[in-house]
């Protein structure tokens, strides 16, 4: 890993720690809008042509709620399940080792792991590749649900997971 990547990774960890990352919901006394406020401001009617999305997440995850709001704003009808054991969900659907994030969704026979943008999911559903699903490992700054106040987007790759568990680039963001 070069010095620039090490420095960016360190800054990202500090930024996520300062923001509470994904482990704490936004405080009601904070100046940040709650996910309910964001949902009310951005939600559109569900698109009947899209399959229902089932999202498995921790009850205390604020960024997961923000990602769900992004999906709803994009027209997905989302069923949210707060679960205590996300590892069993990830194992059941086939998330490859090292590719996990803070929430796992199931939609149209695919899994969606982490902060994948809605447009990439819609592309997956339209193209119907012979694959297990999409992953965005970790929690990249600026990805849906991890938006930064300054609008910055950490470069990240959405990966397509094939039936044998190998991955390939599906989409690039923030480059």
Image: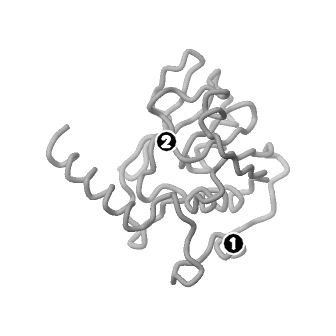
Q: Quadrant of residue 120?
A: top right
> Residue 106 location, x and y as percent?
71, 38
Quadrant of the rendered structure where residue 134 is?
top right
Marking on residue 15: none
Disc 2 vs disc 1: Cβ atoms closer than 8 Å?
A: no
Task: Tell which of 121 and 64 is nearer to you.
Answer: 64
Left or right: where 94 falls relative to 151: right
Q: Which mark is residue 36?
A: 1
- Gap in angstroms between the C-alphas marked 2 and 1: 24 Å
SS class, disc 1:
helix
Identify which residue, 91 or 132, lies in the foreground. Answer: 91
Asked which secondary structure carries label 2, the reply is strand
Horizontal arrangement in the rendering, residue 112 relative to residue 50 (left or right): left
Q: Nearer the viewer, residue 155 or 95?
A: 95
Does 110 appear above or below 120?
A: above
Specify the quadrant that holds the N terminus.
top left
Q: Where is residue 85 drawn, in percent x and y?
A: 64, 40
Q: Residue at x 48, y 25 (%)?
A: 167
Q: State left or right for residue 13 relative to residue 82.
A: left
Q: x, y (%) of residue 172?
A: 43, 43
**Residue corresponding to mark 2:** 136
> Which sits earlier in the primary sequence, circle 2 or circle 1?
1
**Residue at coordinates 69% horizontally, 62% vertically from top-left?**
73
**Pair 2/1: label in front:** 1
- The spot of residue 97 in percent (x, y) is 48, 27
* Residue visible at 40% across and 46% down in the picture: 156
Q: Residue furthest top?
A: 164
Q: Is residue 53 positioned above or below 68 on the image?
A: above
Question: Counting other residues with Cα less than 10 Å from the Cα at mark 2, is it few (<14), some (14-19), or many (20 or more)?
Answer: many
Against 60, residue 123 (above or below) is above
């Amino acid at each position: 890993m070069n010095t620039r990547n090490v420095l960016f990774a360190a800054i990202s960890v500090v930024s996520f720690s300062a923001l509470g990352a994904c482990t704490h919901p936004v405080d009601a006394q904070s100046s940040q809008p709650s996910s309910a406020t964001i949902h009310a401001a951005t939600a559109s009617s569900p698109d009947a042509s899209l399959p229902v999305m089932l999202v498995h997440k921790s009850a205390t995850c604020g960024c997961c709620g923000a990602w769900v709001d992004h999906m709803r704003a994009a027209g997905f009808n989302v069923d949210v399940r707060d679960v205590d054991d996300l590892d069993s969900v990830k194992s059941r659907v086939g998330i490859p080792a090292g590719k996990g994030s803070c929430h796992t969704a199931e939609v149209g026979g695919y899994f969606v792991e982490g902060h994948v943008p809605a447009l990439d999911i819609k592309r997956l559903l339209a193209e119907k590749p012979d694959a297990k699903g999409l992953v965005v490992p970790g929690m990249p700054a600026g990805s849906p649900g991890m938006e930064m106040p300054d609008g910055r987007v950490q470069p990240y790759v959405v990966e397509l997971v094939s039936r044998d568990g190998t991955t390939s680039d599906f989409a690039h963001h923030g480059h």
